[in-house]
C-alpha cells in the first residue's frame, strides 16, 4: 500500500529541512504529488538545486535558502507550519571523524534550533532523521530500540544527542517528536560522487563507467539496505502517529540484511558487468553488521514497508542509467 493513501488536512503545510538533499527532495516530491503545500529549507552545503528544480514552478512549493545553525532562520521557516520533516544534517561516519566540531554545529545545534523553533511556532509534529549508527558496537542482531552500545563516531553521537533532545522536548514542552533511525537508505537522487558517497550509488556509477569499485574490508559486512519509498512512508506515518509514540525513536528499514559483496555481485549482474572489485582496509567507525527489528515502528507508527531490496535496487539502477550524465 505504501503511503499514497495517507490523508492530511487539505491546507496542511509541511516544512522539509534539507529539502534539496537526497531524502529531503524525495519527501518534497511525494508531498507535492499528494497535493500538499511544501516549504523547503536548505543551504545547499550538501543539497543540490537540480534535485528540486522540477518543483520550483509548483505553486505549492516554496524554497527558503538558509542554514539551520541560524535560529532566526529556523523560526521563520516554522511559521504557520503543521509538520516538520527535519532531514538537514551532514552524513558520513568517516567525514565526521575528520570534522567533529562541524558535525556538532550542524547536526546538534541545528536540530536543537529546529526543535525550539517548532515549539515556539506551535508545530503539530516534529519528525527527524536519526540513524542506525546509534547502535554503536552492540553486537546483537537484529538491532532493537533500547539495546544500544558504545558509539563509534561523532556522527553517531550527534544522532544519539538528537534523540535525547527529542525525548526532552516531548516531556518538558509537549512537542510531539519522532526519531527515525534510518538504516542505509538508497534510491533516486542519492549522490554517487565524492569520497563520502554512499556505497550503492557509488558502485552503480563506477560500474557504468567501467571503473573498478573499492570495497572497504572483506565484503562480508552486512547492512539492512532500505529503499527511499519506505523512508517516505515512515515520515508521513509518523506525522499521523499518536502522542503515545511521541518522544521515542524507531528503526526504519526493510528488516532484512545483505552482505556487501552480494550487493556488489547483484548490481554487476543487473548491469551485465564482470568487473572484480578492489578490496581496501576497513574504515574506522564502521559497524560490521546491521539488521533492524522493525516491530516497534510497525506497532506504533503503522509502518509497513513494501519495497524489498531486490525491487528497490532495480528501480535505483534504472534511475541512474537514465540520469547519470557524463
Image (tube, rainbow, N blue to C red):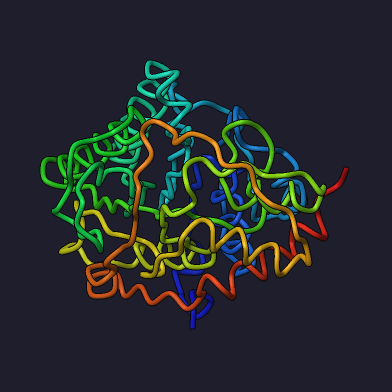
Q: Residue furthest right?
A: 326
Residue 82 in view (yes/no): no
Position of residue 38 measured from the top left corner of the image (x, y, whole percent): 57, 52
Name the one closer to the observer, 12 or 274: 274
Q: Position of residue 272 (x, y in %)?
A: 78, 67
Residue 33 appears in which quarter of the rendering? bottom right
Give the quadrant of residue 141: bottom left
Depth check: 280 or 147 in front? 280
- 167 to 8, vertically: above or below: above
Task: Please state which of residues 92 and 139 is positioned toward the viewer in this rendering.
Answer: 139
Q: Is residue 37 left or right of residue 93?
A: right
Residue in view at x 70 percent, y 46 percent: 51
Please tell me which residue is depicted at 45% across the width and 64% down the height of the picture.
258
Q: For the point 20% across and 60% down, which residue is it? A: 144
| Residue 307 in picture, x, y percent from top left | 51, 74
Q: Is residue 179 visible to the viewer in this orientation of the structure?
A: yes
Residue 188 x/y as whole percent: 66, 57
Picture mark count: 0
Task: Single out the residue that lies furthest toward the top.
Answer: 101
Q: Which of the 4 image quadrants contains residue 94?
A: top left
User: Which residue corresponds to the image point at 88% horizontal and 43% vertical from the top-left?
Assistant: 326
Q: Viewed as shown, does residue 50 lie left or right of 178?
A: right
Q: Is residue 49 above or below residue 275?
A: above
Amino acid at each position: 500500500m505504501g503511503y499514497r493513501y495517507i490523508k492530511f488536512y487539505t491546507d496542511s503545510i509541511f516544512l522539509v529541512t534539507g529539502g534539496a538533499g537526497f531524502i529531503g527532495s524525495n519527501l518534497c516530491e511525494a508531498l507535492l504529488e499528494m497535493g500538499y503545500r511544501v516549504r523547503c529549507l536548505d543551504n545547499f552545503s550538501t543539497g543540490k538545486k537540480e534535485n528540486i528544480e522540477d518543483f520550483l514552478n509548483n505553486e505549492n512549493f516554496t524554497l527558503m535558502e538558509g542554514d539551520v545553525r541560524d535560529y532566526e532562520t529556523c523560526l521563520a521557516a516554522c511559521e504557520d507550519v503543521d509538520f516538520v520533516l527535519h532531514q538537514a544534517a551532514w552524513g558520513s561516519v568517516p567525514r565526521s571523524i575528520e570534522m567533529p566540531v562541524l558535525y556538532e554545529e550542524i547536526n546538534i545545534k541545528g536540530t536543537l534550533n529546529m526543535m525550539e523553533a517548532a515549539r515556539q511556532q506551535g508545530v503539530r509534529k516534529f519528525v527527524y532523521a536519526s540513524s542506525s549508527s546509534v547502535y554503536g558496537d552492540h553486537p546483537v542482531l537484529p538491532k532493537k530500540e533500547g539495546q544500544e552500545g558504545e558509539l563509534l563516531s561523532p556522527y553517531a553521537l550527534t544522532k544519539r544527542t538528537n534523540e535525547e533532545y527529542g525525548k526532552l522536548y516531548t516531556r518538558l514542552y509537549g512537542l510531539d517528536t519522532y526519531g527515525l533511525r534510518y538504516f542505509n537508505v538508497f534510491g533516486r537522487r542519492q549522490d554517487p560522487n565524492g569520497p563520502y558517497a554512499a556505497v550503492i550509488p557509488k558502485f552503480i556509477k563506477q560500474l557504468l563507467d567501467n571503473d573498478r569499485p573499492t570495497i572497504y574490508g572483506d565484503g562480508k559486512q552486512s547492512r539492512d539496505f532500505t529503499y527511499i519509498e519506505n523512508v517516505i512512508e515512515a515520515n508521513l506515518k509518523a506525522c499521523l502517529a499518536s502522542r503515545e509514540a511521541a518522544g521515542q525513536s524507531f528503526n526504519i528499514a526493510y528488516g532484512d540484511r545483505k552482505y556487501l559483496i552480494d550487493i556488489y555481485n547483484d548490481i554487476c549482474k543487473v548491469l551485465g558487468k564482470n568487473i572484480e572489485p578492489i578490496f581496501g582496509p576497513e574504515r574506522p567507525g564502521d559497524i560490521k553488521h546491521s539488521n533492524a527489528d522493525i516491530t516497534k515502528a510497525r506497532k506504533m507508527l503503522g509502518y509497513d514497508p513494501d519495497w524489498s531490496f531486490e525491487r528497490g535496487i532495480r528501480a535505483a539502477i534504472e534511475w541512474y542509467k537514465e540520469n547519470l550524465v557524463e
